[in-house]
Amino acid sequence: PFLINLLKCFDKSNVLFINAGDFFSNPVSIAQQIYSFLELPDYDPIEMPLKNAGSKAQMSESAKSVLQDFFTPINQELYEFIGRDMGW
């Protein structure tokens, strides 16, 4: 619902969808994509060291399966809506 309401106010061409996983794995490249999208001058951001990162929590396979079953159709609808598979 949030994205549908957002796109009532803004054209889809004016919204950039960023996968947080992509950003955390390659922040400089994603930051450059954002600058380009915003039509800002070329800029090479400084890569910052990772801070305050906690360890990845463990999840049981059964919990993971329940969540995947629940979110798969929702995620598929999102991917179709934004025109990009986020790999969730």
Image (cartoon, helix red, strand yellow):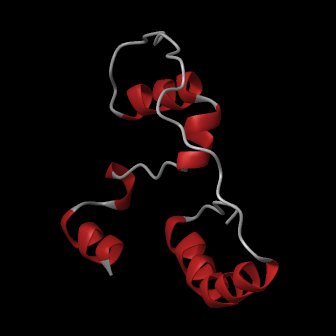
Where's residue 57, x and y in %? 65, 58
Q: Is residue 58 above or below residue 18?
A: below
Query: In the drawing, does residue 40 fall left or right of residue 84?
Result: left
Where's residue 35, x and y in %? 39, 26
Where's residue 51, x and y in %? 48, 27
Query: In the drawing, does residue 82 fall left or right of residue 79?
Result: left
Q: Quadrant of residue 38?
A: top left
Query: In the drawing, does residue 58 fall left or right of residue 16?
Result: right
Residue drawn at point x = 58 percent, y = 74 percent: 80
Residue drawn at point x = 72 percent, y = 78 percent: 64
Residue drawn at point x = 60 percent, y = 47 percent: 21
Q: Quadrant of residue 68?
A: bottom right
Q: Is residue 9 above or below residue 32?
A: below
Q: Quadrant of residue 86?
A: bottom right
Q: Is residue 85 above or below residue 29?
A: below
Check the picture and name the quadrant holding the C terminus: bottom right
Q: Is residue 75 above or below residue 48?
A: below
Residue drawn at point x = 59 percent, y = 70 percent: 79
Seen as rendered, the residue at the extreme right is 61
Check the picture and name the quadrant holding the N terminus: bottom left
Seen as rendered, the residue at the extreme left is 9
Residue 50 versus residue 31: which sits nearer the camera? 50
Residue 29 versus residue 49: which sits nearer the camera? 49
Where's residue 61, x and y in %? 81, 78
Residue 40 versus residue 58: which sits nearer the camera? 58
Q: In the rendered picture of this protein, how many numbered marks are placed on residues?
A: 0
